[in-house]
Image: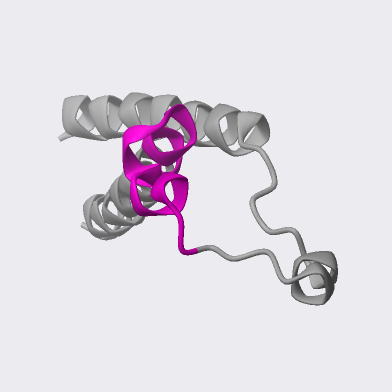
Amino acid sequence: MQILKTILLVIYFVVCLCLIILAMIQSKEDAGLSSTITGSSSNNFFEKNKGNTKEGRQKKWTVILGVVLVVLCIALGAVYAI
């Protein structure tokens, strides 16, 4: 059981570090109130294909790592409760 705890902790720390790095390198997406005033539209080719860009992939991986982090937290809680 100690080996399982160690493996889960190592994976947990790697996921935490990757999630921190991904969150730090992401750019700010929203233009805020200025886009409302200027009337810029988000209905263009770039917005429709945003998932295929570098930023879209970073956002997708951030969400995936966030879900993995939550699952690992639950698994570590269950393992340490035993």
Q: 41 and 73: which one is in front? A: 41
Residue 34 at x, y percent in the picture: 84, 66
Relative height, residue 52 to residue 31 (above, below)? above
Relative height, residue 79 to residue 3 (above, below)? below
What colour scheme has been applied to the protein in the rendered image? Answer: one colour
Count the labels in the image.
0
Q: Is residue 15 left or right of residue 36?
A: left
Q: Is residue 34 left or right of residue 15?
A: right
Question: Is the N terminus in the top left, top right, bottom left or bottom right quadrant?
Answer: top left
Residue 19 at x, y percent in the picture: 49, 36
Question: Is the C terminus in the top left, top right, bottom left or bottom right quadrant?
Answer: bottom left
Any magenta on residue 44?
Answer: yes
The boundaries of the magenta stretch are 43-59
Please identify the dominant SS of the magenta region.
Answer: helix
Residue at 22% from the left image edge and 30% from the top image edge? 2
Q: Is residue 82 left or right of residue 58?
A: left
Any magenta on residue 34?
Answer: no
Q: 30 and 10: which one is in front? A: 30
Q: Is residue 1 left or right of residue 71?
A: left
Residue at 47% from the left image edge and 27% from the top image edge? 18
Residue 11 at x, y percent in the picture: 32, 28
Residue at 36% from the left image edge and 53% from the top image edge? 48
Relative height, residue 74 to residue 25 (above, below)? below
